Amino acid sequence: MTIRVVKPGLLTTVQDLGRHGLQHLGIVPCGAMDPVAHALANALVGNELSEATLELTIIGPELVFGRDALVALCGAEFGATLDKRALLRDRPVRVRKGARLACGRAQRGSRAYLAVAGGFALEPVLGSRSTYLPARFGGLEGRALRAGDALPLAPDASELALARYARLSAGATRRDGIDTVRWSAPPLTLPDHEPIVLHAMEGRHFGLFGAAAQRVFFDAVWRVAPESNRMGFRLAGPALAADKAGELLSGPTCLGTVQVPANGAPIALMADHQTTGGYPKIAEIATADVPRLAQLAPGGRLHFARCTLEDALELGRAARARLESALRAISWGYGR
């Protein structure tokens, strides 16, 4: 059982929650840029949250299903259609054999996640199916999807689709010929307006920047530059000069680290970030805010708000509580 790729979209890759605990070996975590939307999509089709999904970026793919399936599309608002009928987002949808899913362009946000009941039958690499593009491993041959690809699904994907959709019968409905449900999951990471506010702590090298650069970092409105990718978001705005940088030894980096290279344009490190780096680290973005940053397309605007480690931990607890509440509601929809 496969999904045939008619059009691959701008950048469509297989991603899960990543391969963790290997940075000391130079292997980055990878994984979904927006793990919250990824988790919701999996929950909506009855998968474990760690199951792989398709990550769609700005322009989505066009796919043809070889068998019946149960799918969910969460995250950015794409102009998605199923056999030319509007596909409802953030809810489970039953797809018939031969159906064509076309995702179009993102209208709000930049990344969405397509989950299929049973997941993708791809071999894990180092414990994960996530695609790491720079090293070309994981996912489907370590690369983005191409036209003509056939994505293998679980052998029992059709049976799972039928059984799981039957459990949703209390809330099931048929809209414009599409089998779905009357309820939906909340879009937890989509920005309501811009600039979005990202909470950030002073980084290890914050003191190397003069008072003017420190003030500008937190006062300026930054834009995501077109050169941004899964490794890092380059931020366009005023140049930041490190007064006392000199020669720095390379040190560990992590998701949300904000580095400032010699040109003064900050880089916020994202899911495919390098394991070490020698640029001054001016700030660390609160982990809870990174999925919202991942939803900004090039040109998207953001503003940094200073926070403490305690503030960041509280933001994390609140984000987990919102996700857990949404997951419980989905579980109730399945009658659990």
Image (spheres, rainbow, N blue to C red):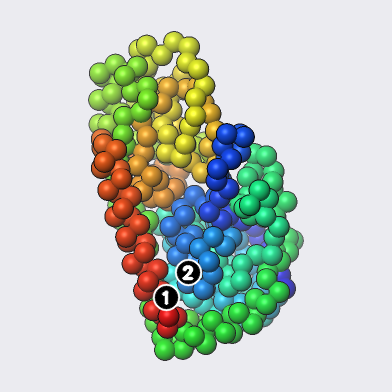
Q: Mark 2 falls on what kind of element? A: helix
In the image: residue 180, left or right of residue 131 = left
Q: Which residue is mark 2?
A: 43
Q: Position of residue 298 (x, y in %)?
A: 45, 43
The one of 288 and 235 positioned closer to us in this rendering: 288
Instruction: Report crowding for label 1: few under 14, some 14 to 19, many 20 or more residues within 10 A (C-alpha).
Output: some
Callout 1 touching callout 2 (CB < 8 Å): yes
**Dot 2 amino acid type:** Ala
Q: Position of residue 85 (x, y in %)?
A: 52, 77
Does the rendering let one see residue 150? Answer: yes
Q: Which mark is residue 297?
A: none
| Quarter holding residue 242 | top left
Classify residue 270 as left or right of residue 223.
right
**Vertical comparison of 290 with 56: above or below:** above
Q: Secondary structure at mark 1?
A: helix
Residue at image location 29% in from the left, 49% down from the top: 315
Quadrant (top left/top right/bottom left/bottom right) for the N terminus: bottom right
Residue type, mark 1 in image: Ser
Residue 4: give x, y in percent of width and height.
70, 67
The quarter of the picture where residue 164 lies is: bottom right
- Residue shown at 33%/55% (left/top)? 319
| Quadrant of residue 40 within the rendered picture | bottom left
Local crowd at mark 2 within 10 Å, few (<14), some, or many (≥20)? many
> Viewed as shown, does residue 44 lie left or right of 137?
left
Residue that appears at 27% across and 31% down: 218
Vertical placement of residue 216 versus 231, above or below: above
> Spatial distance from mark 1 to mark 2, Cα to Cα?
8 Å
Nearest to the observer: residue 186 or residue 10: 186
- Identify the residue under disc 1: 331
**Residue 191 on image: x %, y %:** 34, 53
